[in-house]
Image (cartoon, grey):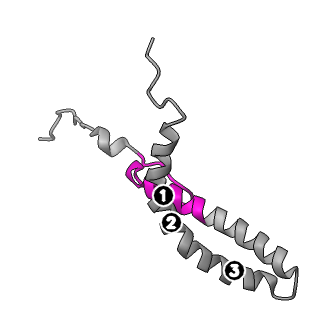
Amino acid sequence: MPDLKPEIKIENRRDQHKPAMIFAGIPKLPAKYAGWIMPFILSALMSATISMINLWKNVGWFDGFFAKWFSVWLFSWMIAFPTVLIFLPLVRRFTGLFVDLTPPPSA
């Protein structure tokens, strides 16, 4: 005799959660990594910009400029990233001397 009981399917909410994606199915990192990722990106952009401007100002444009700039930038970034990590807590405290960082009262 066939089983006539209706099938009850209980879905777990965790199974329904789709993680946020960066692109191409790569999931975003958890928020706890923001303290490492933000200085990583900031130091990359700043050191790339400054090293390119300094190289151009000191020697001008030449054949192989971008190859030379890339090697100069990588060296600069090796210094910039740990420097940002070291100074970021100090800069936050220093900023607190000038800016009221207390959250506004909720209405």
Q: Which mark is residue 83?
A: 2
**CB-based contact (under 8 Å), mark 2 and mark 1:** yes
Mark 3 or mark 2: whose residue is earlier in sequence: 3
> Is 50 situated left or right of 1 in this image?
right
In the image, residue 35 sits, relative to residue 48, either above or below, namely above
Q: Nearer the viewer, mark 3 or mark 2?
A: 2
Q: CA distance from mark 1 to mark 3?
A: 25 Å
Q: Secondary structure at mark 1?
A: helix
| Camera-nearest residue between 6 and 83 | 83
> Is 57 situated left or right of 39 in this image?
right
Q: Residues within 10 Å of mark 2 (few under 14, many from 20)?
A: few
> Is 6 situated left or right of 27 in this image?
left
Give the percent coordinates (x, y) of residue 66: 77, 81
Q: CA distance from mark 3 to mark 2?
A: 20 Å
Q: Is residue 34 visible?
A: no
* Residue beneath disc 3: 70
In the image, residue 24 sits, relative to residue 101, either above or below, namely below
Q: Residues within 10 Å of mark 1 (few under 14, many from 20)?
A: few
Residue 36 colored in magenta in the image:
yes
Instruction: Residue at the far bottom: name it.
Output: 63
Amino acid type of the residue tagged 3 in the rendering: Phe
Q: Which residues are magenta?
A: 18-43
Q: Secondary structure at mark 3?
A: helix
* Residue beneath disc 1: 87
